Image (tube, helix red, strand yellow):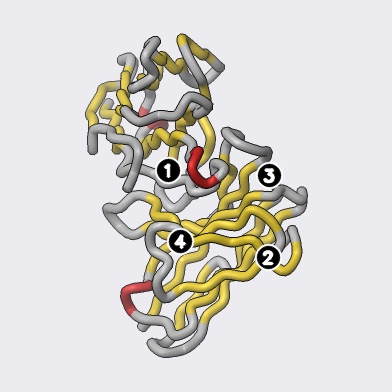
Amino acid sequence: LAKTTQPISMDSYEGQEVNITCSHNNIATNDYITWYQQFPSQGPRFIIQGYKTKVTNEVASLFIPADRKSSTLSLPRVSLSDTAVYYCLVGDKDNQGGKLIFGQGTELSVKP
Amino acid sequence: DAGITQSPRHKVTETGTPVTLRCHQTENHRYMYWYRQDPGHGLRLIHYSYGVKDTDKGEVSDGYSVSRSKTEDFLLTLESATSSQTSVYFCAIRTGEYNSPLHFGNGTRLTVT
């Protein structure tokens, strides 16, 4: 059973900011939250990871509230090339962090 | 690039035949994973390994077996392929211990006719 819940799909337009929220109500104390991006016919690639508050890199920002039961991936000024599926993933404390199960992901479609 | 190679990249096989997919890493990371992905579905964990000879089942392990006799190779075997195992198979490694991100290979597209 996946530990995360995300919207199945989202639409946006070029130049807009996109926020994708992930719910992880049962996140463990030691778990980080990691986001991945997947283009068609490719393996997912790591985007950003965080534990609490806010993390920012050259690609995205990640906002994590104090209770850590959700997280929001923020993509500033999206372009057509940001059209992809985005997954959030949390750890697995019951199996030494090994059994990493993805949720359904969010399919982002960016339109001109 | 985390140095992951999957082979073969594409394979077509007949129902009932055995198939082995290989995942090779160059950096001696402890954790390795096999996922499958079907159209309209996310990634589903088949098996994972946390060291040589140490493996465990994932969400959809029926019909699959794995072996890890050395750190760098993680093999996925379909003992008797079925059409329902037609899928894209991704290998991933974790580049450190708990909470380290996953790095994925380019996938193997398997078609069972």
Q: Nearer the viewer, mark 1 or mark 4?
A: 4
Does B70 appear above or below A97?
below
Distance from disc 2 to disc 4, alpha carbons, whole Å, reads 16 Å
**Residue that badge 3 annotates:** B2
Contact between marks 3 and 1 (CB within 8 A): the answer is no
Q: What residue type is labelled 2?
A: Lys
Total numbered circles: 4
Label 2: which secondary element = loop
Which residue in the rendered view is the most extreme toward the front? A94
Q: Mark 3 lies on which chain?
A: B
**Residue that badge 1 annotates:** A39
**Residue that badge 4 annotates:** B46
Left or right, B89 with reference to A78 = right
Q: Are marks 2 and 3 on the same chain?
A: yes
Earlier-in-chain disc, 2 versus 3: 3
Q: Which chain carries label 2?
A: B
Q: Where is residue B93 in the image (x, y as percent from the top left)?
A: 62, 48
Label 4: which secondary element = strand
Q: Residue at x 67, y 40 (%)?
A: B95
Q: What residue type is labelled 4?
A: Ile
Q: How crowded is mark 3: few (under 14 residues within 10 Å), some or many (20 or more)?
A: some
